[in-house]
């Protein structure tokens, strides 16, 4: 499969690093910048350099505000049975179909851990996107982490509020947790080590069991013990539950505004 990526910024570059070794897939990048790319990836700075070559898949990895200006030039580069894939956050399917009216289209919403191959990604396909196109994209997504298909753009907005924005929530919690550790007298370095490793270990445990998360919490919580004392603060009047509900609701509302 011949794949053309238009733009290769931080997210596109991270994905490409995971994709470059996949069998039966070749990648060409169009980006005016000087880039350091994996071996075997062809880089051109202008689409004119491509001649008349067409591709099985075109991946739009430019900023949303650039899509309308940049992507029309690449319509002829997509084979009649090819698929457009967009990782431009907030750029709607309707806007993409206005540029590529005769092709299958799939919107992709990755998150920042794609940079280390640990993405949680949402996928939404147009009616024209066929099974073969979806299967090909799944191969790419498996290389950068885990993915889920959603059935509407509204669901993609909701996913954005959870996994798309979620790393920011986690980083904020880590930052506040580290502050708490420092207040107990730990150095900046030791506080960070303890908190990050605790978060990492707990997340790995959750990822490697099908047990309810509540049972994992209960397994570390002795009645009247230190964990219970701390949880009483986090759960006072369901404050944390309400905070997370408000957080994801605010992100979802903003995602809808941006679409």
Image (cartoon, grey):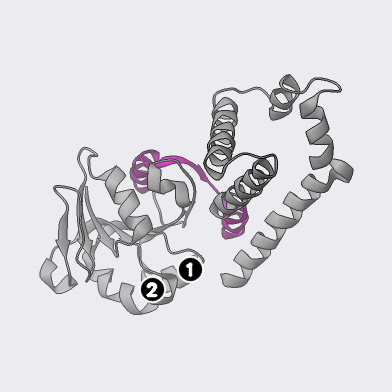
126 sits to left or right of 222:
left
Quadrant including the C terminus: bottom right
169 sits to left or right of 219:
left
Give the image quarter of residue 5: bottom left
Q: Which residue is mark 2?
A: 67
77 sits to left or right of 217:
left
User: Residue 156 lies in magenta, yes or no?
Assistant: yes
- Residue 239 visible at all: yes
The residue carrying pointer 2 sits among few (fewer than 14), some (14 to 19) or many (20 or more) residues within 10 Å by Cα, namely some
Q: Residue at x 16, y 61 (%)?
A: 43
Circles 2 and 1: CB atoms closer than 8 Å? yes
Give the image quarter of residue 225: top right
Q: Which residues are magenta?
A: 133-161
Q: Position of residue 110 (x, y in %)?
A: 46, 51
Question: Mark 1 or mark 2, which is nearer the start of the sequence?
Answer: 2
Q: Position of residue 157 (x, y in %)?
A: 59, 59
Q: Residue at x 83, y 31 (%)?
A: 229
Q: Which residue is mark 1?
A: 91
The residue carrying pointer 1 sits among few (fewer than 14), some (14 to 19) or many (20 or more) residues within 10 Å by Cα, namely some
Give the image quarter of residue 184: top right
Q: Is residue 193 above or below residue 57?
A: above
- Residue 84 visible at all: no
Badge count: 2
């Amino acid at each position: 499969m011949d794949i053309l990526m238009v733009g290769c910024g931080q997210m596109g570059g991270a994905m490409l690093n995971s994709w470059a070794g996949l069998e039966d897939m070749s990648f060409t990048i169009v980006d005016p910048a000087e880039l350091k790319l994996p071996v075997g990836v062809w880089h051109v700075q202008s689409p004119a350099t491509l001649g008349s070559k067409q591709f099985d898949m075109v991946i739009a990895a430019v900023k949303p505000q650039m899509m309308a200006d940049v992507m029309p030039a690449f319509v002829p580069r997509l084979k009649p049975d090819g698929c457009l894939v967009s990782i431009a956050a907030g750029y709607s399917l309707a806007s993409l179909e206005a540029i590529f009216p005769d092709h299958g289209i799939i919107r992709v919403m990755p998150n920042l851990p794609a940079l280390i191959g640990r993405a949680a990604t949402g996928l939404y396909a147009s009616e024209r996107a066929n099974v073969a196109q979806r299967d090909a994209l799944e191969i790419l997504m498996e290389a950068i982490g885990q993915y889920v298909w959603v059935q509407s753009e509204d669901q993609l907005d909701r996913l954005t509020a959870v996994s798309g924005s979620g790393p920011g929530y986690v980083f904020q919690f880590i930052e506040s947790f580290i502050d708490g550790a420092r207040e107990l007298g730990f150095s900046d370095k030791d506080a960070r080590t303890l908190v990050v490793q605790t978060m990492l270990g707990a997340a790995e445990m959750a990822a490697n069991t099908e047990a309810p998360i509540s049972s994992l919490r209960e397994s570390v919580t002795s009645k009247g013990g230190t964990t219970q004392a701390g949880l009483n603060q986090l759960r006072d009047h369901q404050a944390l539950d309400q905070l997370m509900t408000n957080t994801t609701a605010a992100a979802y509302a903003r995602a809808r505004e941006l679409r």
